[in-house]
Image: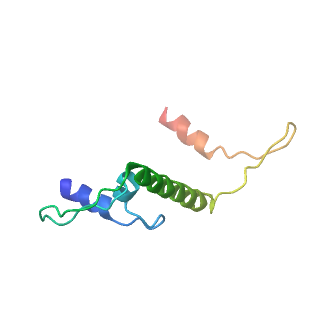
């Protein structure tokens, strides 16, 4: 299960072009098992700016992707005549 979760979180999402781990934690998963290398630590403020930027980009991308095939809602007024299908009503009635 842990391997599956690792692979899933490391995979680049086709819509947002980032891994889920990168979106949540701001860095890519560490795939090597070597001893830690000496690195410079990123300041918290810079990290937060980066994370906010990523989240904003993801939010915009997902909104565009979601709204791509969305249809406008039909607004009915009092007195409008509509046709209803009773097919689903029959199926529900038969299961009761």
* Viewer-nearest residue: 25 or 7: 25
Of all residues, the one furthest to the top in this rendering is 96
Camera-side residue of 72 and 60 = 60
Relative vertical location of residue 28 with respect to residue 45 in this rendering, above or below: below
Q: Is residue 42 left or right of residue 75?
A: left
Judge left or right: residue 63 versus residue 4: right
Q: Residue, x 31% and y 58% (percent of image)?
A: 9
Q: Residue furthest right?
A: 79
Residue 61 lies left or right of residue 7; in this view the side is: right
Could you tell me residue 65's position as x and y percent? Answer: 57, 62
Where residue 37 sits in the image (x, y, percent)?
18, 64
Horizontal side, residue 84 vs residue 17: left or right: right
Residue at (12, 65) in percent of width and height = 34
The residue at the point 19 percent across, 62 percent down is: 38
Name the residue nearer the viewer: 12 or 73.
12
Q: Where in the figure is residue 21, as x and y percent of width and height?
A: 34, 56
Asked whether the viewer can see residue 9, the reply is yes
The relative height of residue 19 versus residue 76 in the rendered view (above or below) is: below
Number of marks: 0
Q: How is the image coloured?
A: rainbow
**Quadrant in which residue 19 is drawn:** bottom left
Q: Is residue 1 in view?
A: no
The picture quadrant where one finds residue 27 is bottom left
Q: Position of residue 61 (x, y in %)?
A: 55, 61
| Quarter occupied by residue 88 | top right
Q: Nearer the viewer, residue 95 or 26?
A: 26
Residue at 40% in and 53% down: 47
């Amino acid at each position: 299960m842990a391997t599956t979760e690792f692979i899933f979180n490391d995979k680049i999402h086709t819509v947002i072009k980032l891994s889920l781990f990168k979106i949540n934690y701001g860095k890519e998963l560490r795939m090597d098992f070597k001893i830690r290398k000496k690195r410079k630590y990123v300041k918290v403020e810079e990290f937060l700016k980066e994370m906010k930027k990523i989240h904003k980009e993801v939010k915009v991308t997902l909104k565009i992707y979601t709204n791509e095939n969305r249809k406008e809602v039909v607004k009915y007024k009092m007195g409008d005549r509509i046709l209803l299908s009773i097919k689903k009503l029959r199926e529900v009635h038969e299961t009761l």
